[in-house]
Image (tube, helix red, strand yellow):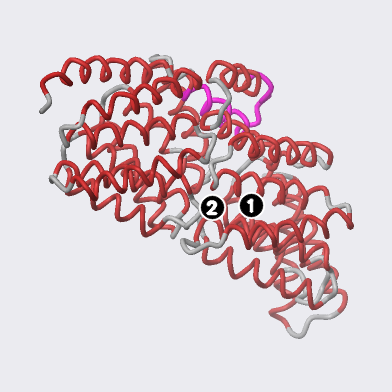
């Protein structure tokens, strides 16, 4: 037990005993305030190392020991909301953050209200399937203006992480990386290790999905891992990126090892959201390795966890990937069911999910002989993907369209679409999929003369 937690515990007990004996005196309230100070410090340390359950416990106790009208309670509520968010208790996080915003605004503490609002907006991105991202971005920009006026470095780090996720929704890896760079600068300037680790997470995510070549992304992730110096959340982010790069190069055993090590960190720390959302890494590795059954196992775990905590943003993406795993096993009814789950959970501007459910549903419809509907959905997916810089996702949408055309006996029309996918895989450095796409291209070229 940390010294701050130990001191806080004894003062907390003294404060509670005095409350049980009768009305609290000013002296008793002072004891409570001292207890809250120590418990909050211990909570900050737990939060910094990523121990979400411990942070929830300590911040909850600190808030309980602080009088309702005290100014010191306002930042405590926001930190408690953040910890509850990471632990996957979204209902409690929402209630606490709403209280933080309302209390801060009533007290005229505009900077603290802006910081709490950023956290509330970040939560909305994970749980609101009807989210208006344009409106959310406008609110985030207003919060950034207030945080800049007040010089709140921690609030600004979180605000730019929020903007990174906005660009992740829109599948703009280049802009996501720029937002992450700003977030990292603010996090380091105020000594916020948790926000620094989250910045690395989004930096890695931008590298995996965006226009950065996989080899360059690997170098960044290896440097991140080398610099982690015992910071588990930074290590987890670095290993996640290396796992993806290994899989792109066909080094599947190495990729599995890195992904397992990354996810075990999140699991051990009680980071339920992070653990659930990173099931995509294991799922993608197994799909690249040609093992859709193993992909199904990893992705089902992610879907079940995220459904249980009421998360929608990552759920919608993972459900679409699970639908793809079902398609590859020719289990088309189940694929359709998961594509429908993805569609229901996906916010209108969650473009990865919007592309994913359309592509996987198109495959199902093509197998059922519903060629026109299948082609319509597949072309919608490609049109959405063209407006992004997520190269792999764009290539996958093209291959889904090519598959729909080939199943419908139109292989000649599929050929240039596959060629375009090959170029995108080459740009990304996804060697495995580039090879598979070229093999498919050769196979269809042989089949074209025999088509009616």
Q: Would you say the magenta stretch is mainly helix, strand or loop?
A: helix
| Tag shown at residue 82 | none
Q: Is residue 347 left or right of residue 377?
A: right
- Provide residue 421's location: percent of width, then percent of height: 39, 25
Residue 71, compared with residue 118, is above or below; it is below
Residue under numbered circle 1: 55
Q: For the N terminus, give its image quadrant.
A: top right
**Label 2, residues with CA under 10 Å away: few <14, some 14-19, many ≥20:** many
- Provide residue 425's location: percent of width, then percent of height: 44, 22
Label whose residue precedes the other's in the sequence (2 or 1): 1
Residue 386, compared with residue 53, is above or below; it is above
Range covered by the magenta-colored residues: 226-244
| Tag shown at residue 87 | 2
- Provide residue 321's location: percent of width, then percent of height: 34, 40
Marks 2 & 1, CB-CB < 8 Å contact = yes
Which is nearer the eye, 113 or 175? 175
| CA distance for labels 2 and 1 | 9 Å
Which is nearer the eye, 297 or 367? 367
Q: Quadrant of residue 269?
A: top right
- Res 377 seen here: yes
Residue 228 forms part of the magenta stretch: yes
- Res 302 seen here: no
Instruction: Residue at 45%, 48% (x, y): give it.
Output: 314
Q: For the C terminus, give its image quadrant.
A: top left
Which is nearer the eye, 301 or 39? 301
């Amino acid at each position: 037990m940390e010294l701050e937690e130990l001191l806080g515990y004894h003062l907390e007990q003294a404060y509670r005993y005095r409350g049980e004996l009768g009305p609290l005196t000013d002296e008793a309230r002072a004891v409570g305030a001292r207890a809250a100070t120590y418990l909050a410090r211990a909570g900050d340390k737990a939060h910094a190392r990523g121990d979400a359950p411990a942070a929830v416990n300590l911040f909850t106790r600190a808030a309980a020991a602080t009088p309702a009208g005290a100014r010191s309670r306002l930042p405590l509520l926001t930190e408690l909301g953040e910890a509850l968010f990471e632990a996957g208790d979204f209902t409690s996080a929402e209630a606490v953050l709403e209280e933080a915003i309302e209390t801060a605004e009533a007290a005229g503490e505009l900077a603290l209200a802006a910081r709490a609002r950023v956290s509330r907006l970040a939560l909305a991105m994970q749980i609101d399937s009807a989210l208006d991202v344009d409106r959310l971005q406008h609110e985030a920009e207003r919060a950034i203006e207030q945080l800049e006026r007040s010089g709140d470095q921690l609030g600004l780090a979180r605000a730019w992480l929020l903007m990174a996720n906005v660009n992740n929704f829109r599948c703009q890896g280049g802009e996501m990386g720029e937002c992450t760079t700003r977030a990292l600068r603010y996090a380091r300037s105020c000594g916020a290790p948790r926000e620094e680790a989250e910045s690395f997470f989004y930096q890695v995510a931008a590298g995996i999905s965006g226009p950065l070549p996989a080899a360059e992304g690997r170098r960044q992730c290896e440097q991140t891992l080398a610099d982690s110096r015992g910071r588990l959340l930074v290590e987890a982010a670095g290993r996640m990126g290396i796992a993806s790069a290994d899989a792109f190069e066909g080094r599947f055993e190495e990729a599995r090892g890195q992904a397992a090590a990354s996810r075990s960190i999140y699991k051990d720390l009680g980071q339920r959201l992070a653990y659930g959302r990173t099931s995509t890494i294991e799922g993608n590795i197994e799909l690249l390795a040609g093992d859709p059954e193993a992909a199904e196992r990893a992705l089902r775990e992610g879907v079940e966890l995220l459904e249980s905590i009421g998360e929608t943003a990552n759920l919608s993406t993972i459900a679409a990937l699970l639908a793809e795993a079902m398609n590859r096993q020719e289990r088309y009814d189940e694929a359709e069911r998961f594509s429908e789950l993805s569609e229901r959970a996906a916010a209108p501007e969650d473009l990865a999910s919007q592309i994913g459910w359309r592509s996987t549903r198109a495959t199902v419809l093509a197998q059922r002989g519903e060629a026109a509907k299948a082609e319509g959905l597949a072309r919608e997916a490609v049109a959405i993907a063209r407006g992004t810089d997520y190269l792999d996702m764009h290539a996958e949408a093209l291959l889904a369209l090519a598959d729909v055309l080939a199943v419908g006996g139109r292989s000649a029309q599929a050929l240039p679409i596959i060629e375009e996918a090959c170029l995108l895989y080459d740009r990304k450095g996804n060697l495995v999929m580039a090879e598979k796409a070229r093999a498919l291209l050769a196979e269809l070229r042989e089949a074209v003369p025999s088509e009616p």
